Image (cartoon, grey):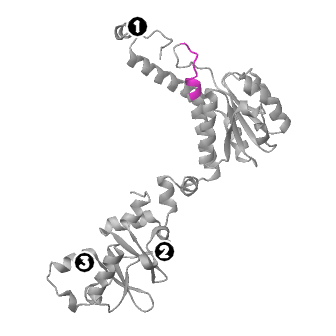
Amino acid sequence: MMNQFDILTKSEIEHQFDILSESKYVFETEINAIKLVKEALDENFVRIVELISNCNGKVIVTGMGKSGHVSRKIAATLSSLGTSSFFLHPAEALHGDLGMISANDIVIAISYSGESEEIARILPNIKIIGATLIGISGNPKSILVRYSDYSYVFPEFREACSMNLAPTSSTTVAMVWGDALAVCLSKVYGFREWNYALFHPAGSLGKKLLIKVDDIMHTGDKNAVVMVGTKLKDAIIEMSTKAIGIINIVNENNELIGVFTDGDLRRLFTREVNIYGLSVDDVMVKTPICIDLDVLAVDALKIMQEKNISALPIIKNHRLVGTVRVNDILGVGIFL
């Protein structure tokens, strides 16, 4: 594909500018912009946080172009940290999606110039609907700020683009401002790890905080169980058939009496013992480590790693209900 720009040769690049220095300039320029906005934070930001925390509706974030991409991210971060939010494309809003806004909602409109045509055209309708409008801009005299019920105006700073044109510092600043908003709101709500896990069930943290051993344990015909007094050879057959590396020994009340593992079996063979004359009572571990039904899988994994064992019996009211293995927990994506 033919490029529409005049591509500099390596020698021309080295003569005209230093790539590494230019990249560091971009970092420094955007960092300085963030610092300026940080120092300018005031009670206006606090009022916006308080306003949103008392909102009975949804928080809708809108923006066009690069500000639209930032708005999508802000809406996603708000939602993941406990503030019900979604992104509204202003062009789509002009063709019916304004119906997604109701009077008890809050609309956050982001436009650094404050004069984006698509944003400007939906402002009167937002006011008619009755939603509260928060305008985020770098232009205090813009149409967005004039229309807004609440506004936040960024201090003046330079874009990192060499022409001071492309949205660079402004989009970074808006992103960080949105992160600060979402995090502060989460603190107001008392948002905790469990809440985060609830909204991120497929993530590592979600799995660690939500999945319990009863979600993944071996039960019923898939669990290896024999009664006390069972011949060892029959117990070995049961353990081999179920292939979970452990056999649970129970009494007539299904209470766990002991366990016998494949490791115990290997150690038994090194002693050249005649297994045909033994019962499980002779070789079982009579004080086995076991866990309760409602234990988190990640905690079971910690126990097994600390005790250097590969499986744990699971009990409820002193009765055996299942078995969980290290591989069962690792298999659902839970790691330490």
Q: Quadrant of residue 64?
A: top right
What numbered label is drawn on residue 16?
A: 1
What's the residue type where badge 2 is placed? Leu
* Residue 154 as seen in the image, left or right of residue 124: left
From this view, report whether residue 156 is shown above or below residue 320: above
In front here: 126 or 190? 126
Real-space Cα separation, disc 3 to disc 1, in angstroms: 74 Å
Question: What amino acid does circle 3 point to?
Answer: Asp
- Is 223 positioned to the left or the right of 62 in the image? left
How crowded pointer 2 is (Cα within 10 Å; few <14, some 14-19, many 20+) is rated as many
Label 1: how many residues lie within 10 Å, few (<14), some (14-19) or many (20+)?
Answer: few
- The image quadrant that residue 103 belongs to is top right
Element carrying mark 1: helix
Residue 169 highlighted magenta (yes or no):
yes
Please report the residue visible at 65 percent of the width from the left and 33 percent of the height from the top. Answer: 42
* Mark drawn on residue 293: 2
Looking at marks 1 and 2 on the same chain, the residue that comes earlier in the sequence is marked by: 1
Of discs 3 and 1, which sits in the foreground?
A: 3
> In the image, which residues are magenta?
163-171
| Magenta stretch prevailing secondary structure | loop
- The residue lying at 52 percent from left, 24 percent from top is 30
Image coordinates for residue 237, horizontal then vertical, percent: 30, 82
Which numbered circle lies on residue 264? 3
Can you see residue 260?
Answer: yes
Sequence-earlier tag: 2 or 3: 3
